[in-house]
């Protein structure tokens, strides 16, 4: 357990905030119903290192409805203590790609049943839940946590993601396919999926083909 209280951490985050960064974040599409302080990621990582793993504090930070506090929560939460109710609460409250990706990169790939959860989320309707699913699959491929069998079992799920014209969904599908292309033992599967996506002729599919072709 860390020596920090949630109020102490919020005070630190407030002191690290930068209004100029908030405007910069907006220009990259990082907007939220939660309060955004404009704390740089390196400062968040430094603070997370000082705090260490503290699951109870992570839960409290998420409840503050502060964007950076929630990102910090993803850095200090214990993946072994992340229960299904908390998972559902967290992914359902995501409203921007930054929080989505930080949750995936820092935490979700470490949890039990990460693959099964990812596939389930890919089939949900909510834009950022769906993005979480595809982004998590990309992270699992990146970290060599899943292989050919797992990808072959969800080829249609990946193709279905390319039919979704919401940019934060199809960009996550592109992210997944780029990582498949980068893994030599998955490259042929990626090319096969890409050819099927090419035939969709949708806004999302055109973006995906254009992006992934850069890695072929």
Image (cartoon, rainbow, N blue to C red):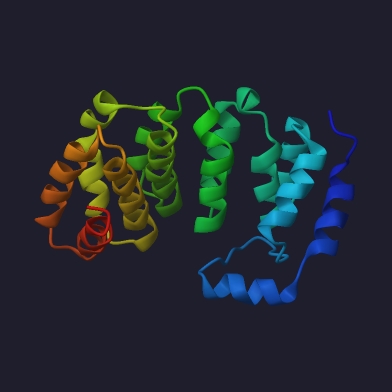
Please name the residue shown 26% across and 32% down the image.
151
Q: In x, y percent, where is residue 208?
A: 25, 58
Q: In x, y percent, where is residue 71?
A: 65, 49
Please name the residue shown 67% across and 72% down the image.
21
121 on left or right of 30: left
Residue 11 found in image quarter: bottom right
Q: In x, y percent, where is residue 58?
A: 73, 38
Q: Residue furthest toward the left?
A: 199
Which residue is more in the foreground, 83 or 26? 26
Residue 87 found in image quarter: top right
Which residue is more in the foreground, 114 or 180? 180
Please name the residue shown 67% across and 41% down the image.
75
Question: Can the viewer see residue 63 in this picture?
Answer: no
Please name the residue shown 25% across and 24% down the image.
149
Quarter of the image for the N terminus: give it: top right
Q: In x, y percent, where is residue 74?
A: 64, 42
- 142 w.r.t. 174: above or below: above
- 136 w.r.t. 147: above or below: below
Which residue is more in the foreground, 133 or 186? 186
24 on left or right of 156: right
């Amino acid at each position: 357990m860390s020596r920090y209280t949630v109020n102490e951490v919020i005070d630190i985050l407030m002191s690290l905030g930068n209004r100029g960064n908030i405007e910069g974040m907006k220009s990259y599409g990082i907007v939220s119903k939660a309060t955004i302080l404009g704390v740089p990621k390196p400062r968040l990582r430094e603070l997370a290192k000082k705090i260490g793993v503290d699951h109870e504090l992570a839960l409290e930070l998420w409840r503050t409805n502060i964007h950076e506090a929630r990102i910090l929560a993803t850095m200090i939460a214990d993946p072994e203590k992340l229960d299904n109710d908390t998972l559902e609460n967290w992914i359902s409250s995501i409203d921007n790609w930054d929080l989505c990706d930080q949750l995936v990169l820092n935490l979700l790939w470490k949890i039990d049943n990460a693959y099964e959860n990812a596939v389930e989320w890919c089939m949900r309707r909510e834009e950022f839940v769906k993005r979480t699913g595809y982004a998590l699959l990309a992270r699992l491929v990146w970290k060599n946590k899943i292989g050919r069998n797992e990808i072959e079992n969800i080829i249609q799920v990946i193709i279905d993601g390319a039919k979704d014209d919401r940019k934060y969904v199809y960009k996550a599908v592109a992210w997944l396919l780029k990582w498949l292309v980068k893994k030599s033992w998955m490259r042929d599967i990626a090319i096969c999926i890409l050819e099927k996506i090419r035939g969709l002729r949708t806004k999302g599919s055109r973006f995906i083909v254009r992006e992934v072709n850069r890695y072929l």
